[in-house]
Amino acid sequence: MSNSSSIRHFLLLALADTRQLQLLHFCLLLGISLAALLGNGLIISAVACGHHLHTPMFFFLLNLALSDLGSICTTVPKAMHSSLWDTRDISYSACAAQLFLFVFFISAGFFLLTIMCYDRYMSICKPLHYGTLLGSRACAHMAAAAWASDFLNALLHTANTFSLPLCHGNVLGQFFCEVPQILKLSCSHSTFRKIWISLVAVYLGFGCFVFMVFSYVQILRAVLRIPSEQGRHKAFSTCFPHLAMVSLFLSTAFFTYLKPSSISSLSLDLSVSVMYSVVPPALNPLIYSLRNQVLKAAVWRVMTGKFRKH
């Protein structure tokens, strides 16, 4: 038995036991990270350089791309290093920093998805008030509020998680430092605080979830009232990518925090964590660009260097 005062490092989960599989995991993680960096980088460049994309929807998409880049750069490089050099160690301070940054960027992405849901709601349900309520100043204020709230949320979770006494060793059942895995190492007399930390995360997530459900119910009702089939298709095409990524993120994140310990296993925890920490940052650029012809054209101009002609 050990306590937090004597722990100087943690041992992360080894993704594979054999050298061949470790190198395979390294190559897979490298491919995923490069895809995420390229896709999100192209979206950021396209929105920043394309003046016709300076609208609320693309402004929030740019912020989402920034949060995706941050989240994947927080977890994947360490996992790649561990696979390539066959090491599992991460220092106590590095683990705390990784957990803070991961919670910060992941919650930023979630809050931004919530704001993007509000943007779709205003665009479809209240188009006459869209320009007034979602002007450039209002968008900047909402984005700033999201990032500031994420910072406080990450600081709260990190401080509370690492202030718990740790009595169950230093071996984490995950390839990065994650709140539920740190909580598993804490002492039994800290049960109330462990529940409180989980409830704060679930409360924030559930509040955003209820808002999204309400918004999409109103959006669906408004879309079904559109007389033309082309108009309904256009409205659905702008909402489908957002709804798909929200569903993937919420289902896996809620499962991570709320699943009973009786069904917990290393392989299950690893699979679920990959689905909400690695997959969305890599898939977001692909999903949003494929369903949006304007963004696709702007990304193509970035790739071909033709922005100077527009």
Image (spheres, rainbow, N blue to C red):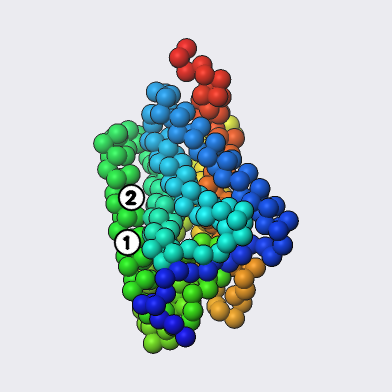
| CA distance for labels 2 and 1 | 14 Å
* Label 2 vs 1, first from the N-terminus: 2
227 versus 162 height, above or below = above
Quarter of the figure that contains the C terminus:
top left
Q: Which residue is mark 2?
A: 146
Residue 25 point in image, percent of width and height: 66, 54
| Residue at 29% from the left image edge and 45% from the top image edge | 144
Q: Residues within 10 Å of mark 2 (few under 14, many from 20)?
A: some
| Residue at 29% from the left image edge and 49% from the top image edge | 145
Q: Is residue 22 left or right of residue 245?
A: right
Report if residue 163 is visible in the image: yes
162 versus 292 height, above or below = below
Q: Nearer the viewer, residue 26 or 262?
A: 26
Q: Quadrant of residue 151?
A: bottom left
Q: Quadrant of residue 204?
A: bottom left
- Check disc 1 and give the amino acid type: Leu
Q: Is residue 267 left or right of residue 289?
A: right
- Name the element at disc 1: helix
Report if residue 297 is visible in the image: no
Residue 118 point in image, percent of width and height: 39, 46
| Residue at 62% from the left image edge and 71% from the top image edge | 266
Residue 88 point in image, percent of width and height: 56, 64
Do residues under tags 2 and 1 come within 8 Å of each other at their CB atoms? Answer: no
Q: Which residue is mark 1?
A: 155
| Residue at 38% from the left image edge and 63% from the top image edge | 93
- Check disc 2 and give the amino acid type: Ala
